[in-house]
């Protein structure tokens, strides 16, 4: 009798523990099911819509997130450079290229949960479309590095991995079915400390 009770108890513990662990893994992973990949960047166009997958909806509720709606904009996240290597805060990167037409955009380094890295010297740690220096052909080059650089610079000081978050607000090209054809900047590692 005792063996039966302990077997049933073990099954319940495994079932409840396994279920809780699988929910934890599903809710804590950043990726969703309907990702749009453009080079090293990935976005989830359905995140702020009623068509979002159930895990995304649960994640938003649990984390009190307020995702952008489809008509408002789209956030792209890069966890690796264009060569597929993870982005590290101690390394320097060159982010260059063009962006699709958008009313406004922001780019900032973040931690694994897409929270901005701590600002240094009381300033926002990112760049936006109104302050970026551009070339004559409207392309740009941004250096993401722990050490200051002239021109467009994102501070990434510290240790560990990071992500880059590029948010395009009111971008008409992202609302059509050919959004995967959109051109986004490439990310090149230039060195590590």
Image (cartoon, rainbow, N blue to C red):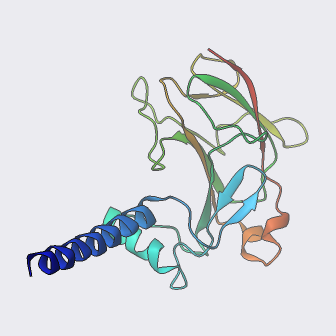
183 horizontally vs 40: left or right = right
Q: Is residue 64 visible?
A: no
Quadrant location, the N terminus: bottom left
Q: How many marks?
A: 0
Q: Is residue 91 visible?
A: yes
Where residue 153 sits: x, y (%)?
64, 27
Q: Nearer the viewer, residue 186 or 122?
A: 186
Where residue 91 sits: x, y (%)?
63, 24
Quadrant location, the C terminus: top right
Q: Quadrant of residue 186?
A: top right
Q: Is residue 80 above or below residue 92?
A: below
Where residue 144 sits: x, y (%)?
64, 29
Q: Nearer the viewer, residue 158 or 103?
A: 158
Taking the spot 83% from the left edge, 73% from the top edge, the residue there is 178
Taking the spot 38% from the left edge, 74% from the top edge, the residue there is 58
179 horizontally vs 61: left or right = right
Taking the spot 47% from the left edge, 41% from the top edge, the residue there is 111
Q: Quadrant of residue 170?
A: bottom right
Q: Quadrant of residue 14?
A: bottom left
20 horizontally vs 157: left or right = left
């Amino acid at each position: 009798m005792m063996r039966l009770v302990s077997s049933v108890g073990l099954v319940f513990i495994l079932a409840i523990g396994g279920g809780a662990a699988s929910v934890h893994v599903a809710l804590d992973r950043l990726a969703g099911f309907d990702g749009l990949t453009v080079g090293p960047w990935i976005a989830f166009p359905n995140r702020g819509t009623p068509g979002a997958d159930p895990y995304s909806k649960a994640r938003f509720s649990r984390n009190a997130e307020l995702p952008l709606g489809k008509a408002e904009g789209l956030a792209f996240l890069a966890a690796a450079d264009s060569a597929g290597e993870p982005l590290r805060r101690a390394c320097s990167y060159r982010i260059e290229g063009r962006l699709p037409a958008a009313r406004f955009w922001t780019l900032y380094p973040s931690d694994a949960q897409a929270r901005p890295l701590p600002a240094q010297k009381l300033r926002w740690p990112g760049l936006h479309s109104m302050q970026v220096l551009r070339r004559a052909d409207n392309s740009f080059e941004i250096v993401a590095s722990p050490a200051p650089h002239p021109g467009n610079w994102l501070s990434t000081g510290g240790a560990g991995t990071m992500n880059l978050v590029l948010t395009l607000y009111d971008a008409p090209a992202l609302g059509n079915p050919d959004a995967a054809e959109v051109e986004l900047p490439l990310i090149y590692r230039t060195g590590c400390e």
